[in-house]
Amino acid sequence: MTDAQETAADPALRTTGGAPPDDVETAPIPLLEPREGIPPVVATDEALAEVIASFAAGTGPLAVDAERASGYRYGQSAYLVQLRREGAGTALIDPVGCPDLSALGDVLADTEWILHAATQDLPCLREIGMRPTRLFDTELAGRLAGFPRVGLGAMVENVLGFALEKGHSAVDWSTRPLPEPWLRYAALDVELLVDLRNALEKELDRQNKLDWAWQEFDAIASAPPPPPRKDPWRRTSGMHKVRRRRQMAVVRELWNTRDQAAQRRDVSPGKVLSDGAIIEAALALPLNVQALTALPGFGHRMGRRALEQWQTAIDRAKSLPDTELPQPGQPLNGPPPPRSWADKDPEAAARLSAARASVTALAERLNMPQENLITPDTVRRVCWEPPAERSVEAVSEALAAYGARRWQVEQVAPLLARALGATAATG
């Protein structure tokens, strides 16, 4: 066993390993191998049953990670799930061979789950039947604690003193069989999550922010799945160049045609047709396949059948009656963009300016990002339509109605009430 592995085997050493003594810079220790080696990939019901029994008998929190094939496959499904728990070691589970992990999720439902950037992994975990009731998000904990870099590699290095190899984060995890270096990387991603969680808990407690963190974690665990996005085609990269409604209709038709093809072939939509090509076609409104071929993204290397498919979608958009063309913007659910406030409502603009200044100052004092102290959207909503009474109690009720957590209300309501009251007095 190497010195690094011996250190990694001792949680106490790992927890303090990132703090160099007396300003002496200490290079992070490369973490090259999981302490028990790379476990076999679980891809059968029999092997999964053994994992379920082993992890049910384990103790302490559960480290969880998932790997997706973003940019390669359609959707955001998990193609590998990594677990680690005291007494059970590490497990690598293949959701292709074991697509239903609800039995595993059930026996671990009451266990605290540790994830890094939980909101990224929870949707794909829910798809396969794994839903935590309690969690600890090490990325969010890092934000609340004021760490400038909160990626997993940076956190492990800064807090624990180890360097994780991150070279395989963007590979095609739908590849089968998965290469051994990828499996090693995946196992190491959960190797130190428990130790990172414990160190961050101590740091948050030292900063008197631990209760705030638990409120945030509880909100993530209890949040319902988000509803489907309305008009997702409007998020096409480069959409700001498209001004006319007929051109918007072309974007919509091409986006929907591409999405259907990508879903049918189970590939990333960008591999079927790029966003840039969609925008070029919308701006040019080509008359025929020959004109389409001359546009960037529709070269001669694209097959005739594919070109005809895209031209057909364009022609559908061009033939729509005006009543069926999309409107220039999405209906606003909330206040208008802040840049227009000075013209629409100068008093609201003054309220927002005062509120932003107060929130910025408080976030700096608390050493955390402003968006974690309170979401900018919540601040805008309260400033655009403030409560009739500018008291702390009324502002607190408004913040809570917009989903602010108790700790956020306690911190932000007094300063927002002062900002709203001051601008009302001067107005």
Image: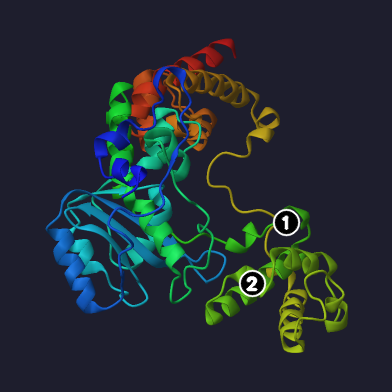
**36 to the left or right of 288:** left
Give, as a three-letter code, the residue at label 1: Gly
Q: State the residue in front, 224 or 270.
A: 270
Which mark, residue 278? none
Kind of residue indicated by mark 2: Lys
The x, y position of residue 150, in whole percent, is: 46, 38
**Farthest residue toward the left?**
57
**Residue wearing tag 2:** 271
Question: Dot 1, how many residues are within 10 Å of its Cα: few (below 14), some (14-19), or many (20+)?
Answer: some
In depth, the one of 274 and 70 nearer the eye is 70
- Single out the mark in the foreground, 2 or 1: 2
Answer with left or right where residue 74 lies relative to residue 17.
Answer: right
Give coordinates of residue 349: x percent, y percent: 62, 26
The residue carrying pointer 2 sits among few (fewer than 14), some (14 to 19) or many (20 or more) residues within 10 Å by Cα, namely few
Specify the label residue 238 is tagged with.
1
Residue found at x 43% / y 76%: 177
Circle 2: element type: helix
Quarter of the figure that contains the C terminus: top right
Residue found at x 30% / y 65%: 39
